[in-house]
Amino acid sequence: MKRKDRFIQFFAMTGILLLSVRSLGQKYRINDLEEDNAALKEEQEELVNRMNYIKQSLIAEAAIEPTGAFASRIRRLFGDDS
């Protein structure tokens, strides 16, 4: 009977150990995902800024053109009513 009790105790302790290791792995995975999320947000902001710069540059360059046709097309393309 003692052997059976020890086996059950050993089995339970092994299960608890495995659950603890799994929880620890999930904790580090969550940390990694949070870091990835922050990096992606930063990259998105940089891309939005870059797109806005390109848009403003195109609008400024189109404004130089004497006929105004290019500027009109650029405004329609970007949805600007200004």
Image (spheres, helix red, strand yellow):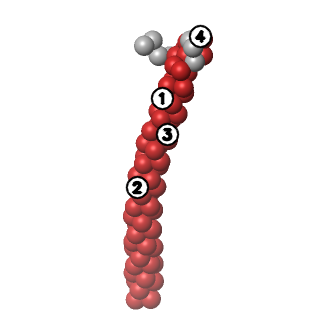
In this view, the residue farthest toward the front is 66
Q: Which residue is mark 4?
A: 67
Does any portion of residue 4 appear in the rendered image? no
- Tell me the element at label 2: helix
Residue under the image location 44 percent in, 61 percent down: 32
Q: Which residue is mark 1?
A: 56
- The amino acid at mark 2 is Glu
Q: CA distance from mark 3 to mark 1?
A: 10 Å
Q: Which disc, if any, is residue 34?
A: 2
Mark 3: few, some, or many residues within 10 Å (few <14, many ≥20)? few
Q: Which disc, if any, is residue 14?
A: none
Does any portion of residue 57 appear in the rendered image? yes
Residue under the image location 44 percent in, 78 percent down: 14
- The amino acid at mark 4 is Thr
In this view, the residue farthest toward the bottom is 2
Q: Quadrant of the N terminus?
A: bottom left
Q: CA distance from mark 2 to mark 1?
A: 33 Å
Residue 17 lies, with reference to residue 46, above or below; the image says: below
Residue 31, quarter of the rendered image: bottom left
Mark 1: few, some, or many residues within 10 Å (few <14, many ≥20)? few
Residue 54 lies, with reference to residue 40, above or below; the image says: above
* Foreground residue among 75 and 37: 75
Precedes in sequence: disc 4 or disc 1: 1
Precedes in sequence: disc 3 or disc 4: 3
Precedes in sequence: disc 3 or disc 2: 2
Q: Nearer the viewer, mark 3 or mark 2?
A: 3
